[in-house]
Amino acid sequence: MIPARIATLLVLAACWHGVWLLGGRAEGFGMATALALVAALGMFAVRARHHVAPARLITVLIGCAAGAASGIALIEMGAMIAAIAFCVLPRPRWPAIGLALLALPVLPTLDILLAYPLRRVSAILTTWLLRLNGIGVRLDGVALEWHGQQLLFDGPCSGVRMLWATMVLACLYAVIRSAPPLRFVAIIAGALVLAIIGNALRASSLFYLESGFLPIEVDPMLHEGIGLAAFAMLILATLFLSHSRRNFI
């Protein structure tokens, strides 16, 4: 058996390139989350009194090697962080590992990979919601057409950041509740669905402002207020759904 601190040092030595990548990509908001991640893992490493089985250490090192061999920076950093978490935690805690992975500078990558699909899904759901309310909007790609106006779902309307924040909240809740693996998967799945629906509701609310449907002067503060209100409702819904044991395994 290998002391957890020694195992962590071995992982760091083997993943030196991943450490360098993390340092180079941590900037802006990503810097804050990366520092919080390093502080949390460092605290667990200092307080670790358990031992790591050689088989587990070999497994995580193989995972790190596979991440490095992928040639994709985010995968390499993710494999490194997961390996460190497996070493510093007495037993695998998937919610904590998920939270650690979300603390990586993943938002730029999510913007590239998920922005358009989320914009498309949000536009479709918004169209359905508005039609249910008797408004005959038409969908054109990622834009809504109504009375000759075209309202485009741009990058910020994709809901990527709302999705990321919801996933962080779900992982944090699962960590606090010590959720087992199957319930953690159910919490994440529920939070994903709620984030997409919540963004569609936000977009539907903003439609009434941006289209001139309501005789209200469009104010940037009002725009932001609607977004914050939608996010607050999303947080409450996520917590309620996660807390309801009837909905999860």
Image (cartoon, grey):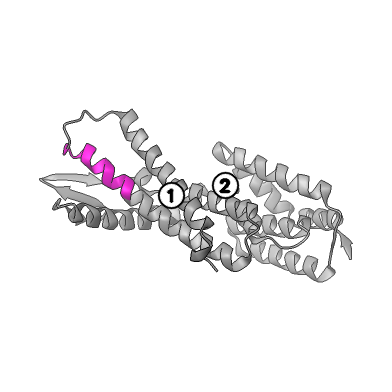
What crowding class fits label 2: few (fewer than 14 Cα within 10 Å), some (14-19), or many (20 or more)? many
Q: Which mark is residue 95?
A: none
Q: Is residue 28 above or below residue 187?
A: above
Instruction: Examine the image and state in which quarter residue 40 appears.
Output: top right
Q: Is residue 88 above or below residue 222?
A: below
Q: Which mark is residue 160?
A: 1
Q: Nearer the viewer, mark 1 or mark 2?
A: 1
Q: Which range is magenta?
A: 201-213
Q: Which one is earlier in the sequence, the residue at label 1 or at label 2? A: 2
- What amino acid does circle 1 point to? Val
Quadrant location of the N terminus in the rendered image: bottom right
Q: Nearer the viewer, residue 129 or 203?
A: 129
Q: Main secondary structure of the magenta part?
A: helix
Residue on which disc 2 sits: 105
On screen, residue 64 versus residue 212, left or right, reads right
What residue appears at the point 72 percent right and 56 percent down from the top-left corner? 85
- Determine the secondary structure under disc 1: helix
15 part of magenta stretch: no
What residue appears at the point 40 percent right and 38 percent down from the top-left corner? 228
What residue appears at the point 61 percent right and 42 percent down from the top-left corner? 33
Position in image of residue 179 (x %, y %): 62, 61
Instruction: Examine the image and state in which quarter residue 118 appears.
Output: bottom left
Q: Nearer the viewer, residue 85 or 27?
A: 85
- What amino acid does circle 2 point to? Pro
212 part of magenta stretch: yes
**Residue 127 appears in the figure:** yes
Q: CA distance from mark 1 to mark 2?
A: 13 Å
- Determine the secondary structure under disc 2: loop
On screen, residue 22 versus residue 187, left or right, reads right
